[in-house]
Image (cartoon, rainbow, N blue to C red):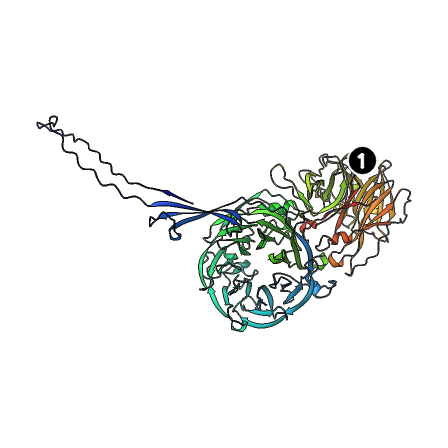
Amino acid sequence: MQFAKKIISLAVIVSLPALMVGCGGDDGKNGTNGTNGSNGANGSNGAKSLINQTLLVAGNSQCFKGGVKIESGVDANNDNSLQASEVTQTTYQCDKTTVNAQMNFNRIATFPACMQVNASCNTNDETAAEIVAASTDGMTLIYTDALKEQIGFTNISNPASPQAKGVLAMGGEPTSIAVKGSYALIAVDTSADFINASGDFVVVDIATQTIVHRRSIGGQPDSVAISPDGKYAAIVIENQRDEDLNDGLPPQLPAGKLVVVDLTAATPANWTTRDVNLTGIATLYAADPEPEFVDINTDNIAVVTLQENNHIALVDLATATVANHFTAGAVDMVNVDLTDNRPAVIKPVEIKNAQLREPDGVTWINNDYFATANEGDLNGGSRGFTVFNKQGQVVWDSGSSLDDMAIRFGHYQDRRSDAKGNEPENIEMGVFGGDRYLFVNSERSSVIFVYDVADPTKPVFKQVLPASAAPEGGLAIPSRNLFVVASESDIRSAAIRAGLNIYNYNVKTQQYPTVQSVNRPDGNPIPWSALSALASDTNNPDILYSIEDSFFGQNRIFTLDVSSKPALIVGETKIMDTNNVFANSGVNAHLASVTNAELAAMINADKSVNIDPEGLAKAADGGFWIASEGSGAAASAVSMNLIFKTDNNGVIESVIHLPAAVNALQINNGYEGIAEYNNSLYLAFQRAWAGETNPRIGIYDLATKTWRFVYYPLDAYSSQYAGGWVGLSEITSLGNGEFMVLERDNRGGLDASIKRLYKINLQAVNDGDVITKTLIKDIKPVLGSTTGTLLEKVEGTAVTLKGDVYIVTDNDGVNDHSGETQLINLGRLF
């Protein structure tokens, strides 16, 4: 519709009599009036301002779920119609985004890259999966493995059961990959060092898995992208800096550039290249652009991030020229944690203004807007992602919300607080039916944040996805309703394997997270991680309690509401030595060599404590029992195995010690669980101590204050990984003198062998007995059903008043861990 506004010019003539005063002259009072002048001509009509409003239907590139396009301008030719040439401003009013709650992404499979070595990943070889692409039919994934200087192929004809399909040597480190038709284009770094930078683009026939063409591109390549129409490839030549030279500061030549590959020739041998000079456009290090990542829109405009320069360039691929460039700008970070505490304490209360974004990954949302993952680099991290328009204006920024969500979902790594926080590494856009999504990969929190960008200027958070450690490249495959993430970290000893996580867009409810926290009164989420125990409430079947282990200081007890899914951490109770009970607990009486300084190190100025809570139980008379694990050296206070009794507010009421002779035997792996039954405490020791064959279960009579010990027969270690162990991780009272114990090995993934629940009876045992056990359930298949890397540390069990059995995994504070926490209801097992 059109609206016109007419501007009319009016001529108004006003005559005013002249007033003349003269000495001795005629004062004019008796003069006659003059003749009125004629009216002036009417002014010409002004030009009309017109507005066009066009209704946009769902699927529009600007407003994906519909809206209104508003064009305005001046009707220069006065034809009552606003022509395209007359439009001076265009804006969009998108319909409010409603997130599709009927469809969700859920992980359906994990493919460890070590399966290319052997089917069971029984190898210490380090592999990697950094950037991933797919064949045009979406049936084969091709990923880069820089560590082994190869690319890997994975068959996902059944995406829930990916299969190794072989590897191909690249003659250098593959850094990125993209697909055109039947070919994969791989950027390969062949540099001898930082000065002698060199690299190739390599063309591989996907079907035959053979190299069909190779060409030098004059520098060290990084990202590669192919235009939607298949006419061009753009390859970033980063020529990265030596981070050990001059504290890693640029400039460090040779300078990087962008290589445009013209792909219109019939064969790769006839493809031609053109270089785009990127020097001189950034203000920080003009001579050293250091381009990082590239993406191409349907207008064949490439967006290139110059990370260390905090700059962005738009390159017209048809002319191989820079069409526009601008700074990525800065962001004020509010309510973030900028301090690496040891032991960890997550405190998102700090502020840092004007933090450079320093973008890494980038993706077009449509032809007018693109989004950057702001990893940060030289100046730390801005910890978010940003949406820009082509003019370089920021239209939306995530602020500190990604860190907030990493904290809420238990994935925040405090040891990265002084660096880049959750560290957004890469970003991908995909259209799935009627929904348009951004996927933001967080390298340090090992999650993917999914946003609905129906309106590119107002992203709306949809869900979070768990990934293997250090996700790098993301790939949307809408034709098969799949999303794939490549994770590059590979530490077999820590049960971390590099590989591919595959997610399906389906009608199932969200399977992750299993736990998240509510807000504190100050509006920030309750920080949590490293759940090392579970306990049930004695009155409410929907309440469980957990606790954080020694990765964190100022330890807290968490209250979980399991009536909702995910379970909610609705409360936190800090363990406090308010009345100096711990400080005066007679540690020196038990170990004469313990100093007051050692004990004081465990008690903070605010009277909170730094211990290693590994066991938790609700006390029959109110409050909690806490088992704190020792760390091995018997002559140190911080290594002692201690039992704390607290009230409901977490204030320590008493401390119980082991007999000195028993404590002297410890060789690490002490208390792992605690239970109360019939006025006695039952303590599960994780492993056997010095000179003993089996781990102990300690029985402490609360009335007589005396100890008895029995021995638990562990299953034999059976993992394919040599050098591990089997131990106890939890004990839970079932009543009538029966207990459930959790027995597990210290392996994860395909190396995991033993994750089992057993029943034992301690009703009538004698000091020194070796007890018997009965299998309740092998929980390894349950852990495997989460479709991720099978998690090593199942650390907590509880039985609710309804009879439901819960287990929970410990994510080690996201330190050498993906951060994934699984709280699983096994149902009624008794």
Q: Is residue 559 above or below residue 310?
A: above
Occupied quadrant, residue 3: top left
**Left or right of 811 on screen, residue 133:** left
Residue 339 visible somewhere in the drawing? no
> x, y percentage for residue 294?
53, 60
**Left or right of 508 on screen, residue 277:** left
Specify the farthest residue to the top: 30
Crowding near the residue tagged with mark 1, few <14, some 14–19, many ≥20 C-alpha atoms within 10 Å: few
Q: Is residue 816 above or below residue 321?
A: above
> x, y percentage for residue 88?
39, 49
Q: Is residue 315 above or below residue 83?
A: below
Specify the farthest residue to the left: 24
**Left or right of 545 on screen, residue 453:** left
> Which one is nearer the viewer's eye here, 112 or 296?
296
- The residue where tag 1 is placed is 620
Name the residue type under label 1. Answer: Ala
> Which one is nearer the viewer's eye here, 519 or 511?
511
